[in-house]
Image: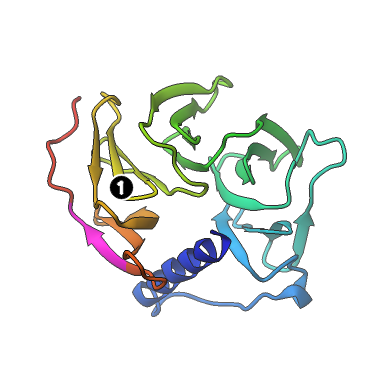
Amino acid sequence: MAIKKILSVASFLLLLIQTYANTAYFKHLSVQDGLSQVNIISIYQDETGALWFGSFEGINRYNGQSVTVFHPSQDNIGLTENEIMAICGNKKGNVYIQALHDLVCYNTRTQQFHKLRANNVSNIYYKNDTLWIAGRNKLEFRVEGDSTIRLLTTFKENIRVSSPICCTDDGYIYIGMNKGLLRIDRAQPERQHSLLPDIKVQSLYQDSQKELMDMYLPPGSVSAGSRRFYPQLPQPSR
């Protein structure tokens, strides 16, 4: 699972590099620059421009000049695990972290970690003031300004750790399952459609043209593919 996750991140970055090669600037970072590990699982850029890198040996914050590494606290109330599976944020001071199966928040103003959920976190995703939290068999959400985590819907089958999530602008939520892609109508979450049977979706992204991009593993393959995805389903309820 870990190797496939790293390959998925690497393949998706290569796709973006090909797209923006004429305008992008690259700097190589290594353990000599302070990184805890070169195998990076997740990446996020906060509102200050700092880059956050999740690894199997803690979370790294790069401010353009130096790297700060964070490891779990001894009291287990802040950063709880070394394995940083996903990172996202609200661009207003909160960085949300999936530390193995826990949900942790880091406040860039107070520079403190705070555990929001212990266990049963498979992936996290943030968009439009809403934090989405995928568990083994359910999807929950937390609206900015409200500390309550609320249930949106449950799944018929359990999802894997690091199952990708993407909320598109047309009102749908997509989740990569063990086999296929689950499409949920946000207005009527009981309306769920299974797409791409037997395909293991590794990453999801909606580009600037509002097209859904997916990285996937064909059956029996270890090499990831990529494509634009055009689901032909009725529009979501309003």
Residue toward you, 5 or 44: 5
Stretch in magenta? 226-230
Question: Which amino acid, mark 1?
Answer: Leu
Q: Verify whether residue 8 appears in magenta.
A: no
Q: Residue at x 45, y 69 (%)?
A: 13
Residue toward you, 12 or 219: 219
Coloration of the structure image: rainbow
Across and down, in percent, residue 19 comes to 34, 73
Q: Which residue is mark 1?
A: 181
Place residue 76 in its image quadrant.
top right
**110 to 207, vertically: above or below:** above
Q: Secondary structure at mark 1?
A: strand
Give the residue at the far front of this rendering: 220
Across and down, in percent, residue 135 comes to 50, 35
Q: Residue at x 86, y 35 (%)?
A: 75
In this rendering, position of residue 120 left or right of residue 237: right
What type of secondary structure mainly makes up the magenta span? strand
Q: Residue at x 58, y 21 (%)?
A: 147
